[in-house]
Amino acid sequence: MNARIGRDNIVTQSLGQIGNCGLFLLQILATIPRSLRHARETVRQLWFVGAMSLTIIMVCGLFVGMVLSLQLYHVLSIFGGTAATGTVVAISIYRELGPVVTALLFAGRAGTAITAEIGLMRATDQIAAMELMAVDPLAYVVAPRFLAGLIAMPLLCCVFCALGIFGGHLVGVSWLGIDNGTFWSNMTATVDVWQDIINGVIWKSLAFGAVVALIAVYQGYTAPPTSEGVAYATTRTVVASSIAILALDFVLTAFLM
Amino acid sequence: MSQRKSYAVGTGLFIVLGFAALAYLATQTSSVANRHQGASYTVDAQFENIGQLKERAPVKIAGVRVGQVESIALEPGKSVADVKLAIDKQYATIPADSVATIFTSGLLGDQYVGIEYGHAKQYVAAGGKLGLTRSSQPLEEMLGKFFGAGGSADAIGGSYEVTAHFSNVGSLSAGSPVKMAGVAIGRVLSVQAEPTKLDAVVTLAIDNRYNQIPDDSAAAVFTSGLIGSQYVAIQPGGSPDMLKNGDEMILTQSAMQLEDLIGKFLVNGSGDGAKKDAGSSTTPAGKH
């Protein structure tokens, strides 16, 4: 009996979390017009979550492209189809790896920082101070970070994909000796702008950006104002974002493809 | 202030870099890079079989891309595919008696429309028609003449079982389709080694709808396509009695390996190989 109640509590708890998160999203959306008056703050956050994440995104994109090319070359050579390496690298990066890996890295690099920052702001009473001064923390602290995440994710994902293609080209053409023309022409013959780049890269990364940024600001904003609470909130950001990204990826793929 | 300026510039650079990457992905690595820019005119061509031809497949003359396939539709009331080709305006001097053929690039590549110039003095006009066409002749089909035709599986209602002995079943496994005239009519129930005869005994479940198969029909193990899976093909015989549940099919032809077949051509020359195939009564090569 007790176990049943416990399970119910977990279910109602997580449902409640999702519901609160949704309401929080509505609140953020409502304050976005006001927060645009603090556009400078949004730009600063964009610098912090976007531009500062470029290094890790670029390095990871390069290596993902390189390892993909290396693996595919060896598998495809069994069938004598190494000419398709470029195509498969491009398709798999655009449709899945680009958005998903970028979002996971983004959650780890930027999401945790957002959660910790907002959580510490609450723990050190900065948010309470803002409320005292009649500054809406949602408009001044939360909304700019959410917007910055939303804008930064697609841009980061494009950079990731471009570097991935570059890495794949580097290994496939320069190292393993696939013909340069074959690599590009097979890729351009198969990759479709709408299906692969707009649906794959842009929509997916926009959705992932919104989800990661929302989870990060929500966890930070609702973190218990203790050092332990902030630590848990940061962990929860990564766990919840990762699950949400992979689950959403399946749903989006089913709808968009 | 300078601190503020540095991140503003950095953010701007980041946004520009992001959009530059997007533009690069969209224009350099996608089909946009192949899309012809200039004006084009449309020419009709009708094919009996377009194989795997898709819209936006290239149209080539002497291997050079001159346009793309605009649309593919079934000609109303006829089993003929009506293919509209959008050809760049700069290639407006295609003789009216040119031949449009569907080719495959490479062994497993995509299909495209190739145009071979004719000798007519008039050129084909916009909205005109290329009267001479040659349909897709996929490698699979040519090999299929040796291996049997392809086809897709069918829903199975009740079925009856017959057995057949093969000296070699290749990679045939339980669940493989049983086909007649290329249409799936049943499934392979089991493949087992026969302990006394030292060959393979295959049990076939054939759909009850197909109960008019003569009992002297032959069963053969074929491969669909070049690297496809194997299936059992039934070639009808002429006996007045029909196959019943529990019967055994006496005439069988074992799996022929592609390696063997190619080896025959390479070693004996194509003439000998073909003659040998035609001589064996159960090979489909004898049909054509």
Image (cartoon, rainbow, N blue to C red):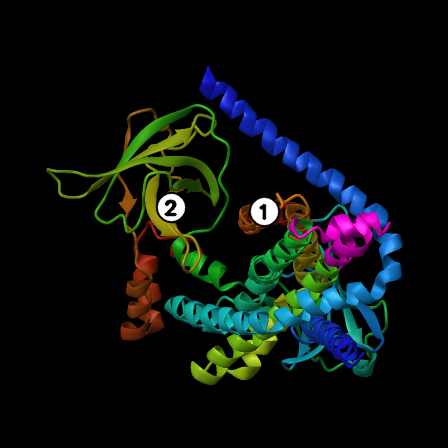
| Residue B72 in the image: above or below residue A173 | above
**Is A6 positioned to the left or the right of B41 in the image?**
left
A107 within the magenta span: no
Q: Which residue is disc 2 drawn over?
A: B231
Label 1 resides on the chain identified as A
Q: What stretch is highlighted in magenta?
A: A123-147
Instruction: Measuring from the top left, give residue A124's x and y in whole percent.
Output: 67, 52
Query: Relative to the observer, which residue lies in front, B215 or A59?
Result: A59
Main SS, magenta region, reads helix
Q: Where is residue B165 in the image (x, y as percent from the top left)?
A: 23, 40
**Residue A128 highlighted magenta (yes or no):** yes
**Residue depicted at x 33% and y 59%:** B277
Quadrant where the N terminus of chain B is found in the figure? bottom right
Mark 2 Cα-neighbour bin, 10 Å: few <14, some 14–19, many ≥20: many
* Amino acid, disc 1: Thr
Left or right: residue A68 compared with residue A46: left
Vertical side of B177 occupied by B91: above or below: below
Query: Where is mark 1, residue-wise?
Result: A226
